[in-house]
C-alpha cells in the first residue's frame, strides 16, 4: 500500500510539495511523482499503479489542474476505485478558485486558497479517521522532509517530528541513503534556478556570450549551486547516520543540522541571487541571505546572528582544524569551557563541512571532551 497519492498540475508543484512534506511529518506514506518516479519509468504504469495501491488520492484543484488531461484521468481513475471499494477514496483540496469538475462539485473540500494550517489540520483528521497513518513502510522507503522557512532556515519542527517517529519504529542498525532526503520545492528558489539554466542554454548561441569569461561565470555559478545542494543532502545523511542511527551523542543535534543546512542553503541562495542581477524580472529572494563561507567577517557574524566571530583552531588527535565562534561562548582552553550550545551551533556544522569538502579527517568521533582550543 503506497498510502496517499497526490494528483496535481505541475504548475502547482510548490504548494503540493509543501503539503507533501507536512503530510510526511504526520507519518503518512506519500506517493508524489517527483519522489516516486525516475527517468525511463512508464507514466501509465507508475501512475495507475500508484493509484491502485494507494489508500487515498488527494486531488489538488486549481485553474491549471482542472485543465490538465492527466489530472482528469487520475480523477476518473479515483472515482472508479471509489465505486469499487465502496468507501471514500478521493479527497479534494482547493488551492485556488477554479471551476470544480462536475463529478465532484457537491463534495466538501479542504480550502487551502486562503490559509494553510487550519485546512491542513482538517485534511489530517480526515485521513487519520480511516487509519491511513497506521501503515509502516520498510525503513529504506521512509522519507525525511527538509523544509526551509525564510529562504534559508530549516523547519526543525517538521524534521524532529519525523525523526521521532522513525526512532520509535525502527532498529538502530538501519542507515539513511541520499534518496530518502526530500527537499521542499520553494517557488522563488526554483524560479532563480530556472533563470540560470536558461542563461546556460543561451550562452551557446547568443553573441553576448561569445566572450569566454561570461560563459565561464554562468557555468561557474550553476556548479556552485549544484555543489551546495549536493552537500546539503550528503551532510544531512552523514549527521543522521552518525548521530541518530549510531547514537554517538546525546546532544541536541537538531541544532547542528539546522546550522549546517543554513550554511549550505545560504551559499546556494546567495549565488542564485547574485547571478540574477544581470537579468530582467528581478526577484528579491536571497537578497538578505548572509553567507558563512565568505572572507567577509561581518557577513560571517551576520550569518550566525552575533556581533562578531573569532577564528580558533581545534586539536583533534593532533589534527588542527580551524573554525569560527562567538568569543562570548569561549571561556577557557579546552572544550570543557565551551557550552553545549556552542558545540552544536559552531563546532559540529563546521566539522561536518570540513570533512565532506576538505576531507581533513576520516571520521568524527563526536567526543569533544578535553580537546584543545587555540586562538588562530
Image (cartoon, rainbow, N blue to C red):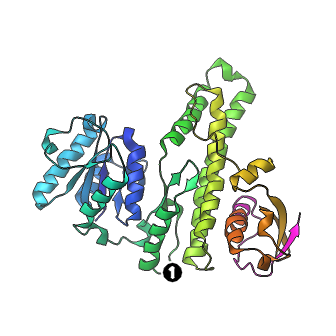
Does any portion of residue 36 appear in the rendered image? no
When asked about the image quadrant of residue 249, the answer is: bottom right
When asked about the image quadrant of residue 125, the answer is: bottom left
x, y (%) of residue 100? Answer: 20, 39
Work out which quarter of the rendered image holds the N terminus and state it.
bottom left
Q: Is residue 269 left or right of residue 374?
A: left
The residue at 34%/72% (across/down) is 136
Residue 59 in the image: above or below residue 21: above
The residue at 84%/65% (across/down) is 312
Where disc 1 sits, the SS reads loop
Q: Residues within 10 Å of mark 1 (few under 14, many from 20)?
A: some
Q: Is residue 283 left or right of residue 170?
A: right
x, y (%) of residue 220? Answer: 69, 39
The residue at 47%/52% (across/down) is 184
Residue 369 in the image: above or below residue 357: below
x, y (%) of residue 261? Answer: 61, 57
x, y (%) of residue 256? Answer: 63, 66
Q: Which residues are magenta?
A: 353-376
Residue identified by numbered label 1: 172
Could you say which is closer to the camera, residue 246 or residue 63? 63
Could you say which is closer to the camera, residue 22 or residue 366? 22
Could you say which is closer to the camera, residue 229 or residue 201? 229
Does any portion of residue 360 appear in the rendered image? yes
Q: Is residue 87 left or right of residue 160?
A: left
When asked about the image quadrant of residue 363, the answer is: bottom right
Amino acid at each position: 500500500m503506497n498510502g496517499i497519492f497526490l494528483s496535481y498540475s505541475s504548475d502547482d508543484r510548490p504548494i503540493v510539495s509543501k503539503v507533501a512534506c507536512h503530510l510526511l511529518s504526520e507519518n503518512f506514506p506519500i506517493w508524489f511523482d517527483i519522489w516516486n518516479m525516475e527517468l525511463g519509468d512508464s507514466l501509465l504504469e507508475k501512475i495507475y499503479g500508484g493509484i491502485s495501491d494507494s489508500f487515498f488520492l488527494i486531488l489538488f484543484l486549481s485553474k491549471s489542474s482542472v485543465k490538465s488531461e492527466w489530472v482528469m484521468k487520475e480523477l476518473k481513475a479515483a472515482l472508479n476505485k471509489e465505486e469499487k471499494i465502496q468507501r471514500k477514496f478521493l479527497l479534494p483540496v482547493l488551492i485556488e478558485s477554479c471551476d470544480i469538475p462536475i463529478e465532484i462539485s457537491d463534495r466538501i473540500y479542504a480550502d487551502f486558497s486562503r490559509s494553510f494550517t487550519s485546512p491542513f489540520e482538517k485534511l489530517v483528521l480526515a485521513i487519520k479517521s480511516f487509519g491511513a497513518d497506521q501503515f509502516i513502510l520498510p525503513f529504506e522507503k521512509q522519507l525525511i522532509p527538509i523544509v526551509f522557512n525564510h529562504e534559508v532556515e530549516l523547519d526543525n519542527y517538521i524534521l524532529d517530528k519525523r525523526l521521532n517517529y522513525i526512532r520509535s519504529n525502527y532498529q538502530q542498525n538501519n542507515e539513511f541513503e541520499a534518496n530518502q532526503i526530500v527537499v521542499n520545492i520553494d517557488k522563488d528558489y526554483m524560479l532563480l534556478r530556472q533563470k540560470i539554466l536558461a542563461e546556460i542554454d543561451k550562452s551557446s548561441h547568443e553573441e553576448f556570450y561569445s566572450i569566454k569569461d561570461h560563459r565561464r561565470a554562468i557555468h561557474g555559478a550553476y556548479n556552485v549551486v549544484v555543489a551546495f545542494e549536493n552537500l546539503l543532502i550528503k551532510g544531512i545523511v552523514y549527521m543522521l547516520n552518525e548521530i541518530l542511527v549510531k547514537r554517538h551523542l546525546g546532544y541536541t543535534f537538531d541544532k547542528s543540522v539546522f546550522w549546517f543546512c543554513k550554511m549550505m542553503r545560504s551559499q546556494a541562495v546567495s549565488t542564485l541571487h547574485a547571478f540574477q542581477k544581470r537579468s530582467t524580472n528581478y526577484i528579491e529572494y536571497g537578497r538578505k541571505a548572509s553567507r558563512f563561507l565568505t572572507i567577509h567577517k561581518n557577513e560571517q557574524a551576520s550569518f550566525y546572528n552575533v556581533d562578531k566571530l573569532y577564528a580558533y583552531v581545534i586539536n583533534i588527535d593532533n589534527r588542527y582544524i580551524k573554525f569560527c565562534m562567538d568569543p562570548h561562548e569561549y571561556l577557557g582552553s579546552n572544550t570543557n569551557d565551551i557550552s553545549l550550545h556552542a558545540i552544536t551551533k559552531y563546532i559540529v556544522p563546521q566539522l561536518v563541512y570540513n570533512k565532506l569538502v576538505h576531507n581533513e579527517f576520516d571520521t568524527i568521533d563526536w567526543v569533544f571532551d578535553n580537546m584543545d582550543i587555540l586562538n588562530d
